[in-house]
């Protein structure tokens, strides 16, 4: 028997979430219903799609193949649906996407133009907030439908992982540090940091606490341009994404990976409520078209 579209969506959700519980929440069905649907698909196909492990699941090799084909089928169905979406000035759909300034300049600037070229009937309104708390609140309030954000986020939200980004240490020229640099060398290191009390500073302090290090706040500021000048003026080192650092600093600073490499997942988050067609299409587009960035070797 041919799998239904619902079964394919459920299986893809399991692949994205890594668990039956998370998948059920992301597609707004009961966990038992999703589990039965996937089991029925396994019986009909005569293959095992999922390998259960504790509270989570992994795809079997056959499951990986089916998920890959399912994504193609679901993208095609969404594209067919879009044919019936009114286009033109009077009937355009607006999709509101909220993100941070860093991701807006970097990832959103790549994803949004390609998405709107493929979906000309959709206008993407991009909004920016510095704090992750503001992003989460916009989703919960319904002000924005999707957020492009560093993961993890509030458990009240559904998330879709799209890429891993390397976080590096950028230091003034002449800094006497090894490359790659061990985390322990952050202890006592003069650093350019966001101002105390901000969401980003709170996240960094939590990371430092987890690593057991205490950098020295040498320059505290929230403006990204000031972060750059803080490093180039020799005030301290900065932790930021490698791809952003390469564009912002060029050869004006020293860039080092951490050992082990520090990778930060980035994804799309949304409230646990049914999504519009435009939002579903954007998630599929981002998942398939987000650039793959490997840590420096």
Image (cartoon, rainbow, N blue to C red):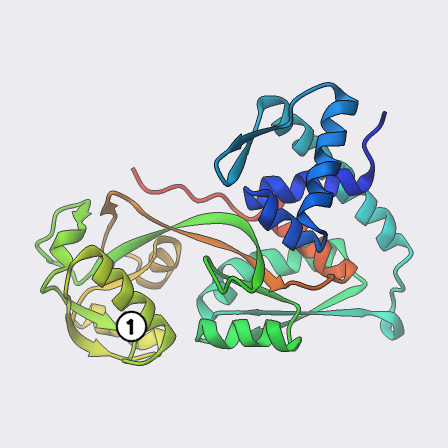
Figure quadrant of residue 75: top right
Vertical side of 198 occupied by 191: above or below: above
Give me the residue at 17% from left, 45% from top.
179
> Is residue 108 shown above or below 10?
below
Quarter occupied by residue 199:
bottom left
Q: What residue lies at 8% left-to-right and 54% top-to-bottom?
A: 176
Q: Is residue 58 visible?
A: yes
**Number of marks drawn:** 1
Q: Is residue 279 left or right of residue 127?
A: right
- In the picture of the structure, the residue carrying the numbered disc 1 is 227
How packed mark 1 is, by other alpha carbons closer than 10 Å (few <14, some 14-19, many 20 or more), is: many
**In this rendering, does residue 253 appear at all?**
no
Q: Residue placed at 58% from the left, 25% from the top?
A: 60
Q: Quadrant of the C terminus?
A: top left
- Residue closest to the far top: 46
Quadrant containing the N terminus is top right
Dot 1: what SS? helix
Q: Where is residue 51 drawn, in percent x and y?
A: 56, 28
**Residue in front for this viewpoint, 73 or 245:** 73
Question: Residue 209: where, in percent of width, then height?
Answer: 21, 62
Where residue 200 appears, as percent x and y from the top left, is 35, 71
Q: Position of residue 100 (x, y in %)?
A: 48, 69
Viewer-side residue, 295 vs 63:
63
Instruction: Please report the residue visible at 44 percent of the width from the left and 75 percent of the height from the top.
Output: 131
Q: Report the side of 93 relative to 269 (left or right).
A: right
């Amino acid at each position: 028997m041919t799998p239904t579209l619902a079964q394919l969506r459920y299986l893809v959700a399991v692949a994205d979430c890594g668990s039956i519980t998370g998948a059920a929440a992301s597609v707004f069905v009961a966990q038992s219903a999703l589990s039965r649907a996937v089991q029925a698909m396994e019986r009909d196909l005569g293959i095992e799609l999922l390998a259960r492990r504790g509270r989570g699941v992994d795809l079997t090799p056959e499951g990986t193949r089916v998920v890959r084909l399912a994504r193609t089928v679901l993208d095609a169905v969404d594209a067919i649906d879009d044919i019936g979406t009114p286009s033109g000035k009077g009937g355009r759909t607006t999709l509101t996407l909220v993100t941070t300034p860093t991701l807006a300049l970097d990832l959103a600037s790549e994803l949004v133009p390609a998405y709107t070229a493929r979906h000309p009937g959709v206008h993407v309104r991009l909004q920016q907030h510095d704090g992750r708390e503001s992003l989460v609140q916009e989703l919960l309030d319904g002000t924005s439908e999707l957020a492009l954000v560093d993961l993890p986020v509030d458990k009240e939200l559904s998330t879709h992982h799209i890429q891993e980004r390397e976080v590096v240490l950028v230091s003034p020229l002449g800094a006497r540090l090894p490359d790659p640099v061990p985390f322990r060398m952050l202890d006592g290191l003069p650093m350019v940091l966001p101002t105390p009390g901000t969401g980003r500073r709170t996240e960094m302090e939590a990371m430092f606490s987890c690593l057991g290090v205490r950098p020295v706040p040498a320059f505290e500021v929230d403006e990204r341009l000031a972060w750059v000048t803080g490093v180039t003026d020799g005030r301290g080192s900065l932790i930021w994404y490698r791809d952003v650092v390469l564009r912002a600093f060029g050869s004006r600073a020293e860039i080092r990976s951490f050992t082990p490499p520090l990778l930060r997942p980035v994804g799309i988050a949304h409230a646990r409520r049914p999504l519009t067609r435009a939002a579903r299409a954007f998630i599929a587009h981002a998942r398939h078209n987000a650039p793959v960035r490997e840590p420096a070797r």
